[in-house]
Structure formats: structure tokens, C-alpha cells
Image: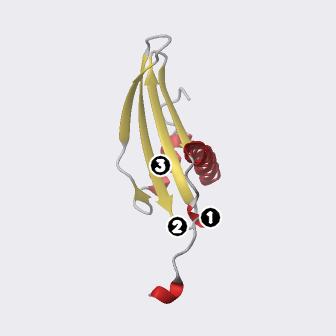
Amino acid sequence: MNDESTVSKFDRIRGNLDGVALFTKPSTIKNVQAITGKAETFVIETCRRDDLGDFIFVECVDESGVTRLALPPKVSAIIASQRDSLTKRRRSAASKRVAQARKDRGEVPGFMRKKKNASAR
């Protein structure tokens, strides 16, 4: 949008939520691409409005300029869901590796150990 009197979609959404929603502090991340060596800076801010959900605001500054995104609640929900899915899969794989290592060492799983006599209590 080259017209300075036109408000961008990012600014319009961010402005409409200001004062009526809960915001995180902006987090700034400076990243240098390992392959190209080019630097970029990200500013991330999350906003929650109870009746709408979570919005994520992303600003990226690199050699080509500034890119700003206002991610709506449906997109932020998918991002959270995918992250949870990856975490679950990673934990499952790690648990299987640990169980196999214990089995290889000859350890008996806890559920297969003999229980102490309950009447001895």
C-alpha cells in the first residue's frame, strides 16, 4: 500500500485489539541464516481476546524491507496444534528408545515386577 492515508491490514487489526485484549510483551529475535549469512530480525507479539481467540503479530525486517503479518485465531490454533503434535511424537520416540535401552540392559519394567505383599502393611 503506497498511499500513506490508507491504514494497513496489520495496523487495523492491531489497533482494533488495543485496549480490549490482553497482549504479551513483544519478543525480538535476531537471526543470521547459516547458509547465506544474511541477518533478519523478527518481532513477535501475541494477543488474546476471549471471544475471538489468539492473534499472532509478526514483523520481519531483512535486506528487502519490512514484512508484517497479523495471523488470525484459526491460524494460531493450527500452529499450536502442530507444535503439540510434534512434541507428542518426539516424546513417544524418546520413550521407546529409553524402554528399548532398559530392555537391552535386562531391566524389568515396573508393571512386570512382583508386587510386595499387601498384607505386610
Q: Quadrant of the C terminus?
A: bottom left
Image coords of residue 115 (percent x, y): 55, 74
Q: Residues within 10 Å of mark 1 (few under 14, many from 20)?
A: few
For mark 3, what is the residue? 14
Identity of the residue drawn at 43% across and 41% down: 44
Disc nearer the start of the sequence (1/2) = 2
* Residue positioned 40% across, 55% down in the render: 23
Q: Nearer the viewer, mark 1 or mark 2?
A: 1
Q: Position of residue 119 (x, y in %)?
A: 51, 89
- Measured as percent of width and height from the top left, residue 20 is found at 44, 63
- Residue 14 location in percent, x, y? 47, 49
Q: Is residue 24 above or below residue 111?
A: above
Q: CA distance from mark 2 to mark 3?
A: 16 Å
Residue 10 circle label = none
Type of amino acid under label 2? Asp
Residue at the image position 60 percent from the left and 47 percent from the top = 103
Quick one: 109 or 117, which is closer to the camera? 117
> For residue 112, which numbered disc appears in the image?
1
User: The N terminus appears in which quarter of the rendering?
Assistant: top right
| Mark 3: amino acid | Arg
